[in-house]
Amino acid sequence: MICSFILLIFVAMFSISEMFVPVAQPQKRLVNALLYMGKKKKKEKKLSYAERLKIHREKIASEQGAVEPSAAFEQPKQESNHTDIAKQMVEAQRRSVDMLTFAKERVEGLPYDAIQDGLEQEGYVVLDDFLSEEGVISIIEEEGLALFNEGMMETDLTRLGSGEYVGTIEGGEAQYQVCPRTIELVVSATKTFGAQLQKYNLDGSNCVANMRTFDHKSKEASLALIEGGELKPQPYDIASQGENDFMRISLFYYPISEGRSDGGIVVEKGERLVSAKRDRLVLMLSNSCRYRPEYFGGDDDIRHTSYLELGLVGKPDVVVD
């Protein structure tokens, strides 16, 4: 990026500087020759190159409102531009490290005895105030909407009519420009949960991550095409199946607005509704806890809602000959 920026500066400098080089003088000589035709030659004082260059610069400045080239292309200004870019890169790296560290500390600080008991007894556990930092929560929420607005999500064909769109969190330069903090949260959480929940032999370097965004207008349009205008609940099932049969722990994180009172999941055992709630984290055994999604309702005041799904996967089986 810096190389491209410096190249653009060089090209701009080269293009503008061409206006002031001695090569431009033949045009001036041509004009002078036309003026001299038919006139008696007079002996005039010959201007030095420095004087001609000064006159030419003053002419350009008066016609175009340009500043003196020496002022426009001073080395200190170029150094300032390079310094600004370097500062931006350092600041971006600092924010990334801060988020990775913050997420790691939040995951490490969870009550793992209670988590283990909840997973073993109920198949799931609910943890409120996961991140407990409004600034970070809002960023994750905003990045979910940004993915939707940038066209990085698709209609969820498994939940037609729900108004939900889904996009895989997979990193890469293009996606990192849109949701850097979300990617860092996924990376740090995957690694740290893998180290903390050792019983499940999790792979701390791999996961299945999706960001979902609910769009109220899309759901309204879908319901208008459905007889009765109402969606039937999806059947209960486990998360670990088909392409995701290697998932061991499923996480649902809701950085949603405070005013939300719908959405979430329904656990089959006891038909317990686990509502979506701002900064709520739900952990669930992927291969045994049966559940179904609870659809968002929405209204014109809260048109969009985004939340994160993270599937922690088991380490690949090692075959020993």
Image: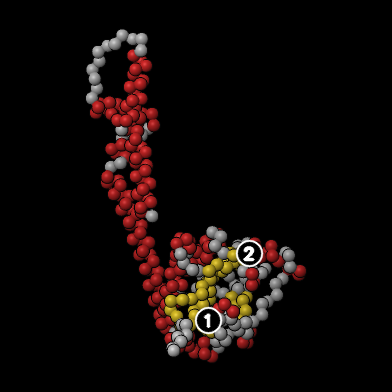
Q: Position of residue 247 (x, y in %)?
A: 52, 81
Given residues 237 and 20, the one toward you in this image is 20
Say whether residue 200 is left or right of residue 276.
left
Q: Position of residue 58 (x, y in %)?
A: 32, 28
* Residue that appears at 33% across and 57% down: 87
Q: As shown in the figure, which amino acid type bears the numbered disc 2?
A: His
Residue 187 seen in the current view: yes
Q: Which residue lies most toward the right here?
A: 227
From this view, report whether residue 101 is shown above or below residue 149: below
Q: How many marks?
A: 2
User: Mark 2 sits on what residue?
Assistant: 216
Of label 2 and label 1, which has the lower sequence position? 2
Q: Tell me the SS state at disc 1.
A: loop
Q: Which mark is residue 246?
A: 1
Q: As shown in the figure, which amino acid type bears the numbered disc 1?
A: Phe
Q: Which mark is residue 171?
A: none
Between the C-alphas of marks 2 and 1, the distance is 33 Å
From this view, report whether residue 14 is shown above or below residue 299: above
Question: On the image, which quarter does residue 35 sit in?
Answer: top left
Q: Position of residue 9 (x, y in %)?
A: 36, 45
- Nearer the observer: mark 2 or 1; the answer is 1
From this view, report whether residue 219 is shown above or below residue 207: above
* Residue that appears at 32% across and 30% down: 23
* Residue that appears at 40% across and 75% down: 104
